[in-house]
Structure formats: C-alpha cells, structure tokens
Image: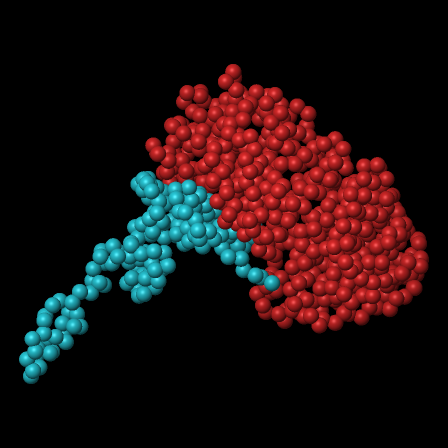
Chain colours: A cyan, B red
Amino acid sequence: MSEKRIISIFKKGNKKRQRVKQVAKFCINDHHDILVEILRRLDGPSLCSAACVCRLWSAVARNDSIWEELCFRQVAPRPSLSLRSVVSALGGYRCLYFVCIRPVLARLPKLLWSRDQLQLSLSLYCVHYYERLYVGAWLSDAPPSSLMFLRKPVNVV
Amino acid sequence: MKRDLHLFQNPKPPITGSSSSSPAPATCGKEKMMMVKEEEDELLAVLGYKVRSSEMAEVALKLEQLETMMGNVQEDGLSHLATDTIHYNPSELYSWLDSMLSELNPSDPMLVSPEIDNNNSFLAGDSSTITSIGGFPASDYDLKAIPGNAIYRRSNQFAIDSSSSSSNQNNNKRLKSCSSPDSMVTSTSNAPLIGTTVTTTTTAAAAESTRAVILVDSQENGVRLVHALMACAEAIQKNNLSLAEALVKQIGFLAVSQSGAMRKVALYFAEALARRIYRLSPPKNQIDLSLSDTLQMHFYETCPYLKFAHFTANQAILEAFEGKKRVHVIDFSMNQGLQWPALMQALAVREGGPPIFRLTGIGPPSMDNTDHLHEVGCKLAQLADAINVKFEYRGFVANSLADLDATMLEIRSTEIESVAVNSVFDLHKLLGRPGAIEKVLGVVKQIKPVIFTVVEQESNHNGPVFLDRFTESLHYYSTLFDSLEGAPSSQDKVMSEVYLGKQICNLVACEGPDRVERHETLNQWTNRFGSSGFVPAHLGSNAFKQASMLLALFNGGEGYRVEESNGCLMLGWHTRPLITTSAWKLTAVH
C-alpha cells in the first residue's frame, strides 16, 4: 500500500474525524508502460537525465523503443521495420544514439536531421560494429575505433 | 644500459691508438652496403650516426638518467613510455616526447660535455672522450647536444641493430668533405628510419637554446629547407651525387629546426633522398601484411580520406545496384574489408529488402601463413548474418592484379547477377609494369560490371623526369601532412604518418618496377579509361551530401573540401584536391 494511504487511514483513526478523501494515489513507478510513453516524448538530454534518476527508471529507459523514437523523431518518412531489426542486430538504438547520433549532433548542432544524416550515422555505426568483431586481433592493445574522430580530442600533452 | 653497450662493442676488433685517418677495412667486410669506404661514413653521417663508440658510455649515462626520470614520473602521458609500444619511426615521437619532457623538467640541467680530447683513440675501454677528426671541431659531433631528452626506445633499437650493421667504428673517420654554411648548426640531425635497418641517434632540439650557435629564424629556415630539398633533387637529377649528399645533410639539420608538418615531411623526404643517393632501397616486403594493414587501419581512423573513398564508392555502387536481386562485388583492394559493412547495411535497409550479396576479395599474399582474406571473409559473414543479408564470399590471393583472369572469378551471367568492381588506391601500382594496366582493364571489361569505382590520389607522380615527380610529391604530401595536423596527437596519428612516409620513400627512392606509387591525375585516368572503352558514370548528389557531412564531422572539418569535377568527387585540403573518387561504366557497344 502506498504511504499516503496508510497516513490517511491513520488520520481516519484520529479523534478529529476529518473527512479525508480516500483517493488511491497514483505512483508512476507502478505503471511502467505509462512511464515508457512519457519517456518516449523526451528529448535527448532530458532522457539521459531521466535514466539517471533511480534504478527502476534506468532499467525502464533501456527499452529500445524509447531511443528509437528519439533517433527518428525528426526523420520523415518513418523508416521501415527492417531497419529496426538491423539496428538491434548491430547493438540497438540506445547504443546508436550514444555512439553516433549524439556526437554528430554535438559536432554539428545546427544540423537538420534528415534521412541522409541518419543513413550516415548508421553506416558509421555498422563500421563500428564490424571493427569490434576484430578486437583482440590487432597488434596494438587498444581496440580499433573508427568513431574516434567523433569524440572530443583530449589533450595528451 | 651497460649491457647494450657491451652488445655494441662486441663486433669490433680492438683498435687502440690508431689515428682517425686510418680506415678499418677489416671490419668493413661485414658491411651490408657495398659502398666505397669513404662514402660509408657519409652515409652514416647522413643517416644520423653521429655517435662513436667512445661516446656510447656517455649515451648510456644519459639514457640512464632519462630512465630514472621517466620512472619517477607517474603521469599517464609518460608512464606509457615504459611499456612496450611499437614505434616505427622514432623521429615522430620525438617532438611529442620532447615537449612532454621539457614541460616536465624544464630545468633539466644540460649534462656536462666530456672533455674534448684530441686523442684519437677510440674503443679505448670505456673512455668517454670525444675524438676529433683531423682538426674538425668536435663540437659538431659531441654528445653535449644530447641531454635527458634522449629517447629510450630509439637507443634500444640502436643497440640491437648495431650488431647487425656493425659499422660504428667507421664513425670516427668522418671526412667532412662538404662545408655548408649551416654546419655551424649544433643539433644533430635526425633522419627518420623505418623498419629494422639503421637507426638514428638522439636529437636535441632543446640543445639549440643553450648553445651559442643557434638556428634562430625558423621561418627563414623553412624557406631554406624547401630550397635545399629542391636543390638536392635537382642535383640528383643532374647526377651530381656529391652535391646531393652535402645537401641532404643540410636538409637534415634544417628539418629539425622546424616543427609540425613541415618537419615531418622534410624528414621523410630527406630519408628518401638519402636512400636514393646511396642506393639503399627500402627493404621489400620487410613489413608484413598485417603490419601494413594496421598502418592503413590507423590511417583510416585518423583522417577522412579512406572513409570518404569508401562512402562515396559505396554510394555509387548502391545506386547502380538499385532493383537488382543478386549482386556481386569484386574488390581489388580488400585489406580489412572496411568498405563493405557500410554497403551491406545500406543494402539491408533498402526498400525491397536486401539482395543476395556476393563478395570476391583480392589481396596480396601474407608473410605468415595465415589466410588473411579468409579471416576477413569470416568477419564479414558474421556481420551479414547479424543483419540478415545472404552472403557469399571468395578470397583470391594475387601478387599483382595483372595476374588475374576473368575466368577465375566465376562471373555469372549478367541477367542473373549484377557485378561491381572496386579499386581503392590500387590501380596506380600497375603502372610500373608495361602492359599490366591494359590487361587489368581488359579483365574488367570481360567481367561486364554495371559500375567500376576507382579511388586514386590526385597528383601526377609518374612523370618521366625525377625532379618533376619530386616537386609534385613534395607539394602533395606537404598538404596531406598539413591536414593531419588537425587530428589529435596519438599513436593513430603517428602510424598514419608512417603509412604516408612509406609511400614517400617508395616514390622518391625507388625506380623501375619497384616504384609502385605511381599516382596519376584524374585527367590522365580519364584518358586511359576512355581509350579502353569506359565512360564516366556521374556520382549523384547523395554521394556529395554524404561526403560533405562526413567531412564536417572531422576535427578541422573546415579545411576539407569536397568538389565535384565532371561527375567525380574530389576531396581536398583547402584549395588542393587530394583524392578523387570516380565511377565508370562500359560504353553501350560492349
């Protein structure tokens, strides 16, 4: 039982007989599907913040459809279902967002997000996946990272 | 350190009290290079061997100091040095390391130079005196110029290789026949050398600030450097090798006074020129396939050239394959197969579903007996499986593309299967052998592809006159290195520079069939393809847009330019086009 309900019962038992409305309080954490629907409508930064709220929300935010919505929000027409299977095979929309789309948007903030840009991000994402198949086979210790150029340069010196 | 010193001293017979002018012919027999004796010293001098055996103790001492200093530093940037990293070209790390060390320890005291001693004995036990040669000031050679900035790895290589080159005892008879005005420069030259041949000694740019004679105006020296490079090439053209030698040394000195891209380019060209003068061809097939693949991989990651090439070629192939149910791609430049994941993904999500995708990869044989092409095929198959694309693969090992035959490739009828042929930076290698390119183009015509995508460097490095080739390539690679400067400093960048350095070396130092880097311009290729029966297929605006967006993502994206020229896309740095993607199809007659 929710906390408020307990309190209201307690209050009921008070000497002062107050008419407290016994409305079942709504707690979003009980309704994951509604939570998902709400998160789907968020923009990138807000969604990332939401995913950090608590463990429950973090788990819910792993739902790939939320990220799919985020990736395709401005893209029209909506891409086909075959794309969904491809992307989930390559690691999912969440990864796609973090690895490709977010850095691209950060690098080019004024970019008009359309199919072409999405296609480019997907290509880069695919190359990234392919390179990870090679981890361990390279001479150097670091795994190959063709998407390194998207990350902010760190000043080593 | 002492152990290294021991290794170093081993091959030499003890010669005590000998004057500097006496050569040591007995040991020269061990030389790999079949040279005139006097030239050997010059060779060593030019390649940076400015350390004599008597000075090795000094070097060892300084290196120990560096080592302790490095050990005391726990910052991330430097502790990396202690681990085994693979440095193929020590000079490239020099500037990075130098700046780090000088930042770390700006008050690093210059080590006191050993007494200048006119005693010409060398190998006299562990004496750390510097012998002077016939009146030449020892200041040109002394190790005072090597403070704690000595690079550990480089000297390690030096010690290991010395037993193989076994020529250090000749250092002391360095007959300095040339007297260039810049011989006053005190910093030792640092010719970069790749691979397992002779290595360099340490350099000391920091020394410049503490010596009385200093290279001041680096801009003026930059101009002088370019002039020296051109003059050296001209001297080689006129077969005036002694002048060329003198100039090469001068270039070495001038180059270390520069910084950044100019320095690296100058050093690579200086090395290549030295190799040409002394007819030291770069060891063939010395670097095995996996290494050269790694270099290309790092080049792929650092700068957009390969990505541009792949993405634009893929776009052309994708458009040509529209509506086809079975497709076959023949890749002349398989390498790691980095081009194909993006194409497969684009085919997987295209309207109408993915076609049946067949890939034939052609590559050179690998040194170790691994079936490299097979591994690449397996990885691609894994990817294809993940994205639900039916995939067939065949790998062909061929020393040269001219060895191919259309029948080997099992081309199916054009009604059933559409074929595309792809070549990225590989066709120019055929121009060294007469008849090879015609044969390959003939094979391509027999294949009857719907599209033939070609990516090549945009520069004429195949002229008959050496001087022209040199000038062209100097401009070209300077621009390339400039564009690399924008990338963040890292091992990737170093490897990319090594990758380009290899091309420079081949271009300048080799001749005949060994010279494979025979780049040609788009116009030249157009003529060649046109006379073979191909017509250009224009790359669409999609390719252009994708390329522009890709470039905008790179650091320094402002410098890169995509241009369209007769339906072909050119990627350039500022105003200079560097690589060109073009697509070709057969004329209707065929």
Taking the spot 50% from the left edge, 49% from the top edge, the residue there is B553
Image position, residue A58 (x, y; %): 32, 61
- Farthest residue, direction bottom: A15
B266 relative to B561 in the view: left or right: right
- Residue situated in front as seen by the camera: B139 or B175: B139
Image position, residue B571 (x, y; %): 57, 40
A49 relative to A13 in the view: left or right: right
- Residue situated in front as seen by the camera: B527 or B166: B527
Report if residue A89 is visible in the image: no
**B220 versus B511 height, above or below:** below
B101 relative to B251 in the view: left or right: left
Image position, residue B320 (x, y; %): 45, 29
**B66 versus B337 height, above or below:** below
Taking the spot 26% from the left edge, 57% from the top edge, the residue there is A38
B512 relative to A48 in the view: left or right: right
Image position, residue B347 (x, y; %): 40, 35
Taking the spot 75% from the left edge, 59% from the top edge, the residue there is B203
